[in-house]
Image (cartoon, rainbow, N blue to C red):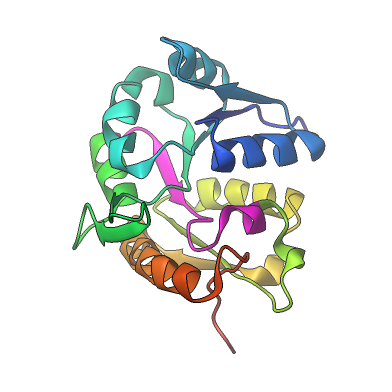
Amino acid sequence: MTTPTIAVLGNGRVGGNLAAALTRAGHEVSVAGRAPGAAADAARTARIIINATPGAGSLDRLVALREELRGKILVDVSNATLDGPDGLPADLIYPGSSLAEQLQDALPETRVVKTLNTMLFPVMTAPDMLTQAPEAFLSGEDPQAKQTVRELLVSLGWRMEWITDLGGIQTARATEAAILFVPHVIRSSGFTPFAISIAR
C-alpha cells in the first residue's frame, strides 16, 4: 500500500512537531510556512492536509484553498479561540458551533476530520508519554476519511483503543469547547503535557 502524501499547514510548535513525527513514521510530508503560495503548493500535491494554523485565522486561510482542497482529507487539529491577556485561550470564536463545522460548511467537497485538539501538542505525537492512557477523538461525516485518519494516528503511536469516533462533524463542538479547560489546567500545574480522556 502506498503511503499517502501529507501537507502540514503551519510550521509552529504544533505543525513542526506533527511534521517531524509523521516523517519519522515513514510518511512523505511537506510543510507550508507563511511564504505566498506555499500553502497552495503543498495542498495541491498532497492527499491529506493537516490544518495546524492558528485557529482564529484558519477559516479564511483554508477557504482560499478551496480548489486545492477539493476531494482531499482535511485533518483539523486547531481550536478557534480568543486569547486572554496572558495569551491563553479565553473564549470560543464559534460558540454553538466549531471551527471544524465552519470548515466543512465552507468546503463541502473536502472531507474534514477533527482530531488531536484536546491535548497539549507534545502528546499528539507521543501519547505514551502520559502516566494514564490519553484519548484522541474523531469527528467527521465521512467514515472512510475517519478510517484514514485513524491509521495516521496509529502510525504516530496511538493505540486503536485510545481512539474514539464521536460521530459527525457537529460533535467537534464538544471537543473544541474542551479548550476552555486548558488555561485553568496550565495556570494550576504549568505546561506539563496532558490530554483529556474518558475514564471507563
Residue shown at the point (43%, 36%) measured from the top left:
53
Q: Residue at x 43, y 29 (%)?
A: 71
Which residue occupies the extreme bottom position in the image? Answer: 200
Horizontal relation, residue 99 to residue 34: left or right: left
Q: Is residue 47 above or below residue 154?
A: above
Give the extent of the magenta segment. 107-124
For the N terminus, the image quarter is: top right
Residue 12 in the image, given as x and y percentages of width and height: 54, 35
**Which of the pair 46/145 is nearer the observer?**
46
Indicate the quadrant where residue 192 lies.
bottom right
Extreme front residue here? 86
* In magenta stretch: residue 117: yes
Q: Nearer the viewer, residue 120 or 125?
A: 120
Give the tally of numbered discs.
0
Q: Residue at x 41, y 26 (%)?
A: 69
Q: Please state the horizontal and vertical placement of residue 144, each as a whole percent of the image.
A: 54, 48
